[in-house]
Image: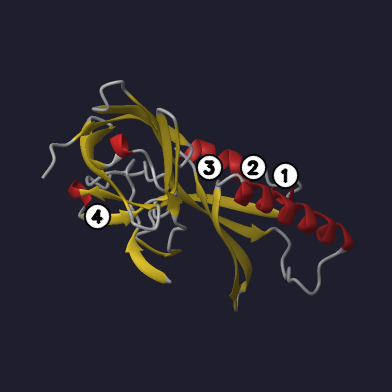
């Protein structure tokens, strides 16, 4: 089942500061007047194949969220949405494209923020040890601003775990977590809505998880403390 949910942008925060969005739109325009998919030269066809392979590598590494061709009456052009911590990194991704290197396309880098995105419901994850169950609270530092987060784990009768994340400061509650994997005193999970991941280690008292939150090619410390039982 699919549902529409708010795309959580933890590194941009509630302040909506630019350009630290973590996402950039790359516009690709052909340098040759009249370029079209059905009139490519042999060399352009060779470069187009390399271009597609490059995009696949970005997709596989999590750096590419979307690639599309725009059939504008004024001429074909393309758009990419990439995940990068800053404009310079996004430009490096653009300039690494073989078709841009060969001057088949020229590009433009524009900060964007995806607000809504349709995502697949997360796959179920195996149950975790009892000491991990419950509510965990912490905060991410975003350029001096503190963004509160809360993570909830609850084992289910079918031996799976229900896991969600709240970001109260952004009005995002109950975002489903995926790929929850516990290995002894360490645990990791993914937040598909924001393309974020977390990996942390539980202390001996089972009261604190110390780890790193990663998103858009950047990472920041995130300590989660066990909240009092309700």
**Few, some or many residues within 10 Å of mark 2 (<14, 14–19, 20+):** some
* Numbered label attached to residue 95: 2
Whether residue 197 appears in this view of the structure is no
Viewer-nearest of labels 4 and 1?
4
Separation of residues labelled 4 and 1 (CA atoms): 41 Å
Separation of residues labelled 1 and 3 (CA atoms): 15 Å
Mark 2 or mark 3: which comes first in sequence?
A: 3
Q: Quadrant of the C terminus?
A: top left
Marks 4 and 1 close (CB-CB < 8 Å): no
Viewer-nearest of labels 3 and 4?
4
Name the residue that disc number 3 marks: 90
Name the residue that disc number 1 marks: 101
Marks 2 and 3 close (CB-CB < 8 Å): no
x and y, in percent, of residue 199 in the image: 42, 33
Q: Is residue 136 above or below residue 36?
A: above
Marks 4 and 2 close (CB-CB < 8 Å): no
User: Helix, strand or loop at disc 2?
Assistant: helix
x and y, in percent, of residue 195 in the image: 44, 49
> In the visual, does 205 lie left or right of 67?
left
Separation of residues labelled 2 and 1 (CA atoms): 6 Å
**Few, some or many residues within 10 Å of mark 3 (<14, 14–19, 20+):** many
How many discs mark residues in the rendered view? 4
Mark 3 or mark 4: which comes first in sequence?
A: 3
Separation of residues labelled 4 and 2 (CA atoms): 35 Å
Q: Is residue 81 above or below residue 117?
A: above
* Numbered label attached to residue 172: 4
Q: Is residue 218 above or below residue 39?
A: above
Separation of residues labelled 2 and 3 (CA atoms): 9 Å
């Amino acid at each position: 089942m699919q549902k529409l949910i708010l795309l959580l942008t933890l590194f941009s925060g509630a302040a909506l500061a630019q350009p630290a969005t973590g996402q950039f739109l790359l516009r690709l325009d052909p340098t040759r007047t009249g370029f079209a998919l059905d009139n490519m030269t042999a060399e352009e066809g060779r470069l187009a194949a390399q271009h597609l392979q490059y995009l696949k590598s970005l997709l596989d590494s999590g750096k590419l969220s979307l690639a599309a061709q725009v059939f504008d009456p004024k001429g074909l052009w393309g758009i990419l949405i990439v995940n990068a911590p800053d404009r310079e990194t996004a430009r490096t991704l653009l300039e690494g494209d073989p078709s841009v290197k060969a001057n088949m396309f020229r590009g433009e880098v524009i900060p964007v923020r995806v607000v809504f995105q349709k995502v697949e419901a997360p796959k179920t994850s195996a149950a975790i040890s009892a000491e991990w169950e419950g509510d965990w609270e912490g905060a991410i530092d975003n350029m001096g601003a503190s963004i509160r987060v809360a993570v909830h784990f609850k084992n289910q009768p079918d031996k799976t775990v229900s896991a969600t994340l709240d970001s109260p400061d952004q009005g995002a509650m109950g975002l489903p977590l995926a790929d929850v994997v516990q290995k002894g005193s360490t645990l990791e999970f993914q937040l598909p809505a924001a393309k974020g991941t977390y990996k942390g280690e539980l202390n001996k008292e089972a009261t604190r998880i110390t780890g790193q939150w990663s998103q858009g090619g950047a990472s920041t410390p995130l300590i989660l403390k066990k909240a009092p039982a309700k």
